[in-house]
Image (spheres, rainbow, N blue to C red):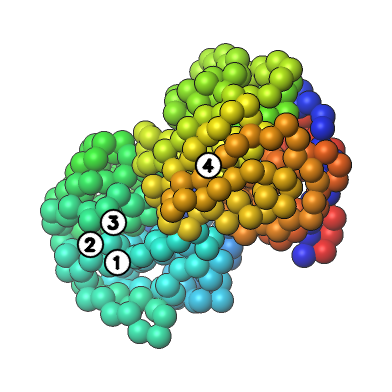
Amino acid sequence: MDKFKIAGGGELNGEISISGAKNAALPILAATLLTDQTMTISNVPHLHDITTTMELLGRMGSDLMLDEKLNIEVTNNNITEFFAPYEMVKTMRASILVLGPLLARYGEADVSLPGGCAIGSRPVNIHLAGLAAMGADINVDKGYIKARAKRLKGTHLTLEMVTVTGTENLMMAAVLAEGKTILENAAREPEVIDLAECLIAMGANIEGAGTDTIIIEGVDSLHGAHHTILPDRIETGTFLVAATMAGGKIKLKNTRPELLDAVLAKLRSAGAEIVVDDTNITLTMKSGRPAAVDIHTSPFPGFPTDMQAQFTALNCIAEGNGTITENVFENRFMHVQELQRMGANIKLEGNTAICNGVKQLVGAPVMATDLRASACLVLAALVAEGETIVDRIYHIDRGYETIEEKFSQLGAEIIRIPG
């Protein structure tokens, strides 16, 4: 099992390019199942979850081609299996996203209940209730969702809670349903908008993506299209937090600053100087510790839960006390115990982490417990005294493209140790 060896203490300086967003690429790969014509997807990040999704599509009968620029061509005119097995999807919650497209186009799907990071309960009941309301026959048996439908029917759905994958799954199901579907209390995340824009390019009739009410008028079929995945706002935020903690000046290229308003506001409060233009963000952090910040996570456009762990690391070495309240997932503070091994002064009270910043963390062997916790520990290691070994980094490979190479470009001392 691979590990990172990190020597902390240096500033970060230089520039890197931001990769495409995993959380946009995964649903868009699933959306290719909705047409028998060729889809071309650009700016796809090279990540383990992407590879797993491509293997899953290939097992179903998809014809996939990947060029040297990481453009993926997908043609689904010979799907022979409508089955997503447990052994392929147990590490990746996004596997549930094939359910809506398979059911909408082929009328059947047998999909394993998904896995992913152990960060709390993320039930799929909203997906299933929505599909059932659209006329699907749904059974859950021995860990598999078994869904059947002749043709889905448009309906009016008010989602029980805001769910990104639920919104995406039901939106993909609705584009080929008969009649109009209205999704209320829909997720507003940029990745939902990106999926909607891809579906519209394929011939779907969708209005309201990016608001809490999405209206879909079903069509008989979709056609092929080309779509470029939007930049990864969480990768962007992670590197910005790293530079705020370590000091220095970095420029992040090929990103979307407007997707990070809540994160940039907190970084400025911490003391970072930030300059943005259409596709670039430049952050300068002068010498001295950042100021502690208070965070409350919430669905977009609020502060993203996927940036909570990184800001927990920042508060560990900040001047003053900062509180971080996690409102999205109930089990997303597993990184706290590992940060305490490095000397962090953190106290957990329910869904709130109270950090009393220390001047210096100390390198130690630590273990990643989920994707964003992995990033948090890397950030802490970059500013810690001495050497840190981060174990179980397969988590980080699910969501960050060659993170050690990008940090090395910025001057960090980080290497991958083969397991």
Work out how far the residue at label 2 is from the one at label 1, CA to CA, in angstroms: 8 Å
Work out how far the residue at label 3 is from the one at label 1, CA to CA, in angstroms: 12 Å
Q: On residue 130, which mark appears? A: 2
Nearer-N-terminus badge (1/4)? 1
Give the amino acid type for the residue marked by disc 1 in the picture.
Asn
Give the amino acid type for the residue marked by disc 3 in the picture.
Leu
Nearer-N-terminus badge (4/2)? 2
Q: Nearer the viewer, residue 307 or 115?
A: 307
> Is 38 above or below relative to 285?
below
Q: Nearer the viewer, mark 1 or mark 4?
A: 4
Give the amino acid type for the residue marked by disc 4 in the picture.
Ile
Residue under the point 82% across and 29% down = 10
Q: In the rendering, at what x and y percent does residue 231 appear?
A: 53, 35
Work out how far the residue at label 2 is from the one at label 3, CA to CA, in angstroms: 7 Å
Neighbor class of circle 3 (other Cα within 10 Å; few <14, some 14-19, many 20+) is many
Work out how far the residue at label 4 is from the one at label 2, CA to CA, in angstroms: 38 Å
Q: Nearer the viewer, mark 3 or mark 4?
A: 4
Q: In the rendering, at what x and y percent does residue 189 appear?
A: 38, 40
Neighbor class of circle 4 (other Cα within 10 Å; few <14, some 14-19, many 20+) is some
418 sits to left or right of 395: right
Asked if disc 2 and disc 3 are in contact, CB closer than 8 Å, the reply is: yes
Residue under the point 68% across and 24% down = 289
- Residue that extends furthest to the bottom in the rendered view of this protein: 142
Instruction: Name the image quarter holding residue 133.
Output: bottom left
Q: Mark 3 highlights which residue?
A: 170
Instruction: Name the image quarter holding residue 355.
Output: top right
Instruction: Name the image quarter holding residue 214.
Output: top left
Give the amino acid type for the residue marked by disc 2 in the picture.
Gly
Nearer-N-terminus badge (2/1)? 1
> Is 204 above or below relative to 295?
below
